[in-house]
Image (cartoon, helix red, strand yellow):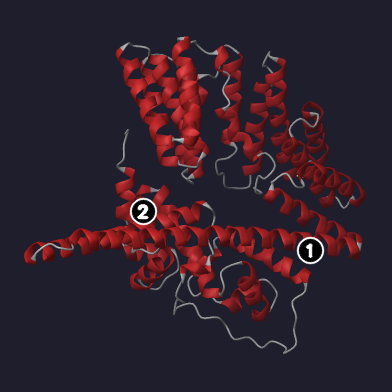
C-alpha cells in the first residue's frame, strides 16, 4: 500500500469525541477535567497529578464515568505526543474500568486507541485484535456518538498492515464499512465531517486498484462535502486526483488538479505534502516537456529538502549544546561538594561521584539522543559517528569533470527515500557501489547527495539508519530488550556484537545495555 499522506489525520477523529451524546457526568467534574486537560499542554507533570488525584476521589465516590473520562484525557494527551507506552497504560486502565462498570462505548473508544498505538509500533496482530474488540462492543450503535466511534474503528483498521495480493481490497472493505457507518449519523454537521474523510479513504483505495471512475466519484464527494473548510483535506484530495490523472496520462487534467492542490497546501506548513506535490509536478512537466516549469519545481523541491535538513541540524546542535552545559554543571557541583572533606570521605565520595558522573553522562547522552530522535534528527554530523570498518565506500571510476544536475539529485533523493522505507540498510555487506548500481548512478554522485542531504558520509548514513531502526524496536517492542547483542547485530547487518555495540554507542552516546537500562528506569515511572 502506498504511504497514506492524504488522510493520515484519521486518528484525530477518535480523539475528537462527541461526549455530548454519551452518558453525562457531574458538571463540576466536567469543568475540572477541561481545566486539567488545558494544563496538560503547558505543565504536564502537575496536571497529571491533579487528574490522578481526581480519579482516586471519583473512585471513592463511585463516580466511575468521571474516572474513565479522566484516564481518557491523559490517554489522548500522550497519544497526540506519540508516547505509545503511556498512551497504552492509561487507555488500558480506562478500558478496565469501563468494562467493569458497563460503559461499552467508552471501552470501545479506548480499544480503538490501544489498537492504533499497537499499529504505530508495528505490532499489527495485537492492533487488529484490539480494534475488533472495540468493533464487537458497538457493532449495533445506539446513537450518533456510537456510530461515529464505530466508523472510526473501521477507519483505524486500514492503518494495520496486510500482506498478500488482496491487501488493498481488504483496506477498501473497511473503508466502505466506515463510510457506510458515518452516513447513518443523524447530526448533519458530524455526518458531513466524518463521511468526507470516509469518501477520501474509499477514493484512495479505488485509486490503488486503478478503478479510476469510482476513485474520482468518491474524491469529488469529499470535495463537495468539505467545501474548502479543511484546507488539508481539500489540498490532499486535489493532490490525489492530480496523481491519478498523471497515472492515466491525462496531463491537462492532472495539471489543473495539482494547481488547485497547490492553492490549499502551499505555505500552510504541510511539508511532506508539499514535497509530494512538487514530486508530482516534476513528473508532470517531464511528460509535458516544459523545461521552465520543470526547473522551477525541481528547484522548489530541493529548496524544501534543504530547509528541512537545515532545521533538523540546527535543532540537533542546540540540543547537544544544552546537554553539554548540563554535564559541565554536574561536574562543577560535584567538585564543590567534595572540597574541604577529609581523606577517607573524599575517596568514598570520589568513587561514588565517578559512578554518578558516569551514570549522569550516560543519562544526558540518552536523553539528548531521544530528544534528537523526536525532532527527527537522524543524520546530524554533531553526533561524531565513527566510520564502521565493515562498511567501506566503493571506489568506482568516475569521469573527472562530472557535475551533479538537479534532475539527478532529485532522482537520487527519491531513490534513497525508497531504500530507507524498504530498510535496505540492514543488508549485510551493503556498499556504496551496490546502492549506486541499484539507483543507476555512480558512487561520486551518490556520495555528493548523501553528503549534502543526509549524514556527511556513507558510513554515517548507513550506521545511523541501522541504529535508529533497532532503537525503535527496543523502545516499542519490549521483547527486543531481552535479546542478545548478537541477535540485534545480526538483524541490523553487522558481522559481530562488538561492531554493533561500538556503532550503537557512537550514534546514541551510550552502550546498548545502558540504553536498555535507562529506558527501563523511565518505564517504571508508573501512575505518579
Q: Can you name the residue that lies furthest to the front here?
A: 340
Residue where numbered disc 1 is placed: 299
Pick whichever, 78 or 252, lies toward us.
78
The image quadrant of residue 102 is: top left
Residue where numbered disc 2 is placed: 480
Q: For the point 56% across and 69% down, which residue is it? A: 455
Instruction: State the image coordinates of residue 242 (x, y, percent, origin top left).
Output: 82, 46
Question: Which numbered disc flags the more N-terminal residue, 1 or 2?
Answer: 1
267 shown above or below 114? below
The answer to whether residue 375 is left or right of residue 348 is: right
6 shown above or below 437? above
Mark 1 against mark 2, which lies toward the viewer? Answer: 1
The image quadrant of residue 323 is: bottom left
Pick whichever, 132 or 452, lies toward us.
452
Q: Secondary structure at mark 2?
A: helix
The image quadrant of residue 407 is: bottom right
Amino acid at each position: 500500500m502506498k504511504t497514506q499522506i492524504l488522510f493520515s489525520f484519521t486518528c484525530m477523529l477518535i480523539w475528537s469525541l462527541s461526549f455530548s451524546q454519551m452518558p453525562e457526568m457531574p458538571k463540576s467534574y466536567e469543568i475540572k477535567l477541561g481545566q486539567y486537560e488545558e494544563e496538560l499542554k503547558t505543565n504536564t507533570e502537575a496536571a497529571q497529578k491533579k487528574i490522578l488525584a481526581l480519579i482516586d476521589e471519583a473512585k471513592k465516590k463511585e463516580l466511575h464515568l468521571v474516572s474513565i473520562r479522566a484516564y481518557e484525557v491523559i490517554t489522548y494527551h500522550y497519544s497526540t505526543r506519540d508516547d505509545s507506552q503511556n498512551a497504552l497504560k492509561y487507555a488500558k486502565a480506562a478500558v478496565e474500568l469501563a468494562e467493569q462498570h458497563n460503559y461499552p462505548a467508552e471501552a470501545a473508544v479506548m480499544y480503538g486507541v490501544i489498537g492504533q498505538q499497537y499499529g504505530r509500533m508495528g505490532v499489527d496482530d495485537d492492533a487488529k485484535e484490539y480494534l475488533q474488540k472495540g468493533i464487537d462492543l458497538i457493532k449495533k450503535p445506539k446513537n450518533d456518538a456510537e456510530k461515529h466511534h464505530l466508523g472510526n474503528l473501521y477507519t483505524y483498521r486500514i492503518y494495520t498492515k496486510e500482506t498478500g495480493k488482496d491487501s488493498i481490497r481488504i483496506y477498501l472493505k473497511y473503508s466502505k464499512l466506515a463510510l457506510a457507518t458515518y452516513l447513518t449519523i443523524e447530526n448533519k454537521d458530524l455526518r458531513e465531517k466524518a463521511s468526507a474523510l470516509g469518501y477520501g479513504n474509499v477514493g484512495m483505495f479505488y485509486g490503488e486498484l486503478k478503478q479510476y471512475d469510482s476513485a474520482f466519484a468518491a474524491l469529488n464527494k469529499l470535495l463537495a462535502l468539505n467545501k474548502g473548510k479543511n484546507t488539508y483535506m481539500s489540498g490532499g484530495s486535489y493532490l490525489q486526483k492530480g496523481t491519478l490523472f498523471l497515472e492515466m496520462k491525462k496531463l491537462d487534467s492532472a495539471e489543473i488538479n495539482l494547481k488547485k492542490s497547490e492553492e490549499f497546501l502551499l505555505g500552510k506548513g504541510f511539508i511532506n505534502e508539499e514535497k509530494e506535490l512538487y514530486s508530482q509536478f516534476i513528473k508532470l512537466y517531464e511528460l509535458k516537456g516544459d523545461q521552465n516549469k520543470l526547473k522551477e519545481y525541481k528547484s522548489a523541491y530541493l529548496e524544501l529538502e534543504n530547509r528541512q535538513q537545515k532545521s533538523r541540524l540546527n535543532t540537533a546542535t542546540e540540543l547537544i549544546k544544552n546537554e553539554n552545559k548540563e554535564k559541565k554543571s554536574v561536574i562543577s557541583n560535584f567538585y564543590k561538594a567534595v572540597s574541604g572533606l577529609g581523606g577517607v570521605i573524599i575517596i568514598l565520595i570520589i568513587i561514588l561521584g565517578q559512578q554518578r558522573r558516569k551514570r549522569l553522562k550516560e543519562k544526558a547522552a540518552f536523553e539528548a539522543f531521544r530528544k534528537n530522535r523526536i525532532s527527527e534528527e537522524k543524520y546530524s554530523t554533531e553526533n561524531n559517528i565513527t566510520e564502521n570498518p565493515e562498511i567501506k565506500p566503493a571506489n568506482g571510476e568516475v569521469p573527472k569533470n562530472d557535475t551533479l544536475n538537479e534532475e539527478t539529485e532529485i532522482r537520487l533523493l527519491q531513490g534513497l527515500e525508497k531504500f530507507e522505507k524498504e530498510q535496505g540498510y540492514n543488508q549485510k555487506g551493503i556498499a556504496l557501489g551496490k546502492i549506486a548500481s541499484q539507483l543507476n548512478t555512480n558512487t561520486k554522485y551518490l556520495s555528493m547527495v548523501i553528503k549534502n542531504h543526509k549524514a556527511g558520509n556513507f558510513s554515517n548514513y548507513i550506521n545511523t539508519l541501522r541504529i535508529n531502526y533497532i532503537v525503535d524496536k527496543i523502545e516499542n517492542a519490549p521483547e527486543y530488550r531481552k535479546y542478545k547483542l548478537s541477535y540485534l547485530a545480526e538483524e541490523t547487518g553487522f558481522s559481530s556484537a562488538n561492531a554493533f555495540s561500538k556503532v550503537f554507542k557512537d550514534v546514541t552516546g551510550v552502550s546498548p545495555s545502558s540504553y536498555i537500562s535507562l529506558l527501563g528506569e523511565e518505564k517504571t515511572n508508573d501512575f505518579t
